[in-house]
Image (cartoon, rainbow, N blue to C red):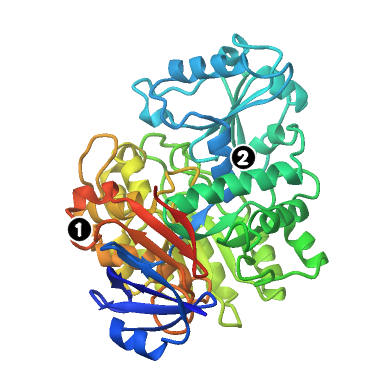
Amino acid sequence: MGTLWYGGTIYTMKEEGEIVEAIYTENGEIIAGDQIHILKEKYAMFITDYQDLKGNVMFPGFVDSHLHIIGHGEKIIHLDLSKMTSPEQVLVAVKERIHVLDEGVWLIGEGWNENQWEDPRVINKTELDEITTNHPIMLTRVCRHAIIANSKAMELANVDKEVMDPQGGKVIRDKSGELTGYFLDNAQDMVKQAIPDISEKELRNLVTTSVDDLLRLGLVGGHSEDLAYYGVDSFQKTWQAFHAGIDGMARKFRAHLLVHHEVIEDMDEQGLGYGSGNKYVSLGAMKIFSDGALGGRTAWLQEAYSDDKTNYGIAIHRSENIEILIKRARQLEMPIAVHAIGDQAILTIAKLLAKFPLKNARRDRIIHSLVINPGVINALKQINVVLDIQPTFVASDFPWVIERLGKVRANNSYPWKTFLQEGIPCAAGSDAPIEEVDPLLGIEAFVLRKSSLDGAIYNEKEQLSIYEAVSLYTKGSAYVINHEHDRGIIASGYVADFTIFDQDLFKVDKESIRNIKVEKTVVDGTIVYQRK
C-alpha cells in the first residue's frame, strides 16, 4: 500500500523549474508523479496514506557528498571550539571542562581556528600545562590536519624532544628546539595512538547522535569517511556501529562509507568490497590523503606559499606510494577518493588517474580541489573523475587565504562555476565537522560566495545559480556513487527520499536562504524528521 504526497510545490530537479502536482510512493519507491486527480483515480485502491504538504516545498532528498558522520557526532559531544574568537577564550573553555572530568580522563576539543582570532597565534603546550598536568589534552584544529597536545598527552604517547618528523607530517618546535605541542598531518598520529580505544557501543552512540542531527537539517544521506580512526579492529567495530545505529527500522539514513587505505585489507579479509552492505549502509571508494590543508600551510602547492616563501606544503605520500595504493584499489575493482587541496597534489593525482584508469563504470573522486590553475583544469578534463567540493570553504577561508596564496592564485581558486562550465562533474558536501553541515549554508555559499569573516563577496564570477547548487546536493551526490538511475531526482523508479522546506528555495531572496526551515525529512518513504 502506498502514499500520496500533494498540496505543495514538488520540484523534480530533472530540469530547472520542472514541478509535478503530486507523487505516489510505495515501499520506499516513487511510483508516479502527475496531476493529483490522475493519481487518485489510478491508485485509488492502493493509497492508504495521504500526506498533505500544506503549501510546503519538496525536493529530492539532499545528500552531503563528503563529511565525517562520527566526527560530526564527536563535535556535538566533545568540547566545541569552533565558535571561539581568541586563544584566551579557548583556554577558559578548556579550564571549565577540566573541572567536570574524572581524574586522568582525556579532554578532547574540536574545531579551533586561529584565522578567526584577532591574535592568530597557535596555543602552546605550556599554556595547557598551566591548566592541568593530570589530564591529557588534545585540541584538534578545524581542518583536522593539526592538533595541539599538552605534556601529559605527549608523555602517554611517548613523544619527547628526540622525536623525528614522519613522512607526511611535521612536529613543530620553538627556536630553542623544544616541542611546542603542535603536530601537523601524519605527526598527529603519534599522539592519537595513545587515546584509549573507543567501544562499539560508544561509536554507535556517536553515529545515532550525528545522524539524528543530519536528518534534522534535511539530509537523507551522506558519504562519510570514519572507518580507520578508532583503535584496534577499527574497521569491524565501526562498520558494525553504523549498521546498529542505522538499522532501517528505528533510524533510516543512507550512509555511503569511504574506506581509508589503512583498513582496506581488513575490508577485503571479511569478504567485503565496493557496494557491500545494504540500502542504508554501504561501502564506497578507497580513501587516500595526498596533502594537508591551507590553514596550516600543509596543502601541497606548485609554488611556495605567499606568506611562507620556503614552504610548498606537505605530500602525505610519495607519488610511488600513491601509485601502489591505486593499483591495489584497481585489483579490488574500487574507485579511489583522494583528498587533494593544493594544485601540485591535484595534478599529481590527475596524472596517476590517467595512468591507471578504472576498467568498470565506477567513478573516482578528488575531494576539495581548491587551488586551481589552467593546467590543472586541463588535466582534470582528460580523466573520468568527479570533484567533491565544499562550498562553505569560501565563506570560512576568505580573506585569509589570499595571504596564503597571493591575489592571482586566490582569484583562480575555489572555481565552482568554472568546473561546471568546463564539463567537470561535481558533487557537494560540507566536510563536517570541519565546516557546518547545514546544506542551506552550503547553497548560500555557492550562490553568494560571501565571507563569514568580513562579509565581502569573493570571485563573484564563480557564483552558482540556486538550481546548480541544489543539483550538486541531489543529482551530483547520486552521480558520484553511480546512483543517478535511482537517486537525486523525483521520478518513477527513484527512491522516495525527500527534503521538504517551509519556503521555496528558488523564490526567496538569496540573502535569506539560511532562514528557510526544514519541515520534514523523508527516507525510503518514511518521515524520519518533522519540525514541531
Q: Earlier in the sequence, mark 1 or mark 2?
A: 2
Q: Nearer the viewer, residue 194 or 379?
A: 194
Up-down: is 278 above or below 290?
below
Residue 377 shows up from this direction: no
Q: Nearer the viewer, residue 61 or 178?
A: 61
Q: Residues within 10 Å of mark 2 (few under 14, many from 20)?
A: many
Residue 46 shows up from this direction: yes
Distance of mark 1 from mark 2, alpha carbons?
A: 36 Å
Amino acid at the residue labelled 2: Gly
List x then y, in percent, for residue 11.
Answer: 30, 72
Q: Is residue 181 left or right of residue 123?
A: right
Check disc 2 and report the residue beneath it.
169
Label annotation for residue 461: 1
Residue furthest toward the top?
Answer: 130
List x then y, in percent, for residue 208.
Answer: 60, 48
Q: Residue at x 71, y 68 (%)?
A: 328
List x then y, in percent, for residue 4.
Answer: 40, 76
Amino acid at the residue labelled 1: Lys
Q: Quadrant of residue 133?
A: top right
